[in-house]
Image: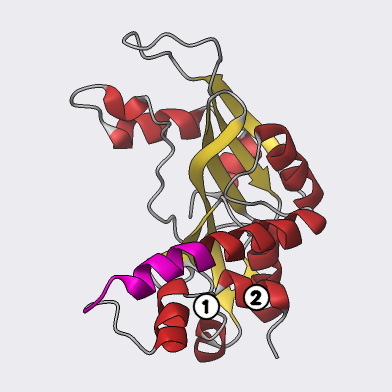
Amino acid sequence: MKSELEGRLQFDAIQAAEDLTGLDSHKTDLPVWLAIGMMQANGKRKSELLTAQLDSTFSSKLDYYERVLAAEGFSKVFEMEIPNDPTHEKDYQDKYFIYWHPDGLLLSFDSYFGDSVNGGHIYFNFKPNDWKQFCTLNIPLSGGGGVYESLDCREAIRYYLGKMRETGTFLPVWENRPFLWLLHYMDTKEEGYDYKAITASRIAQLPEHVRNSITPA
């Protein structure tokens, strides 16, 4: 049986609205408008459940998010100020962070408006005990489909990482390096930016034990 949180995380507002009205959202807007309200209500309750468990939400403030990371066992291994966009005046300073977990989890994210989490990913090597069973968990992973994957770092990271630990093993030393995007939002504003060079530069600034763990032999 699904927990309430699991149900909230997997909630499909459009499908729920179509089931409730018996109407096809491709033929009429009524289910869509209903779905918007259902999505908002679900999001509010979902955030309440996650916050009660000291887990991340899409609206996490930076200080709260860093508390979540500390509770999960992450430690900060890189931090830099994001250069200001010269076309915008602002009275806050955004930053870019990289965190590391001894299970072999590399977390990269940036902030916006100075105090909120913008976005990023957790990179790792993971081996499930049974791929078919693991796929039924509906964890929103991306990657190559082998032992290397990534996970959006914003919502429910403690919940999802916990589910993964129950059903498989993270590799503290990677066997394969997944596609890494270690860039903040201003990196991409520069014309002709080289994401490979920027990512390589960020990796070079990480502690030796982290570089060794994410560099396959």
| Vertical comparison of 33 with 111: above or below | below
| Vertical comparison of 18 with 215: above or below | below
For mark 1, what is the residue?
138
Numbered label attached to residue 82: none
| Vertical comparison of 146 with 119: above or below | below
Query: Which segment is the magenta one?
Result: 27-38
Residue 77 horizontal side relative to residue 216, left or right: right
| Percent x, y of residue 100 | 65, 44
Q: Secondary structure at mark 1?
A: loop
Front-lying residue, 205 or 16: 16
Residue 37 lies in the magenta stretch: yes
Report the residue at 44% width, 88% height from top.
19
Q: Main secondary structure of the magenta part?
A: helix
| Percent x, y of residue 59 | 60, 45
On the question of residue 175 being in view, the answer is: no
Report the residue at 77% width, 41% height from top.
67
| Percent x, y of residue 11 | 53, 74
Q: Secondary structure at mark 2?
A: helix
* In this rendering, the label closer to the viewer, 2 or 1: 2
Report if the CB atoms under discs 2 and 1 are less than 8 Å apart.
Answer: no
Residue 141 horizontal side relative to residue 42, left or right: left
Q: Amino acid at mark 1?
A: Asn
Q: Amino acid at mark 2?
A: Glu
| Percent x, y of residue 50 | 72, 59
For mark 2, what is the residue?
6
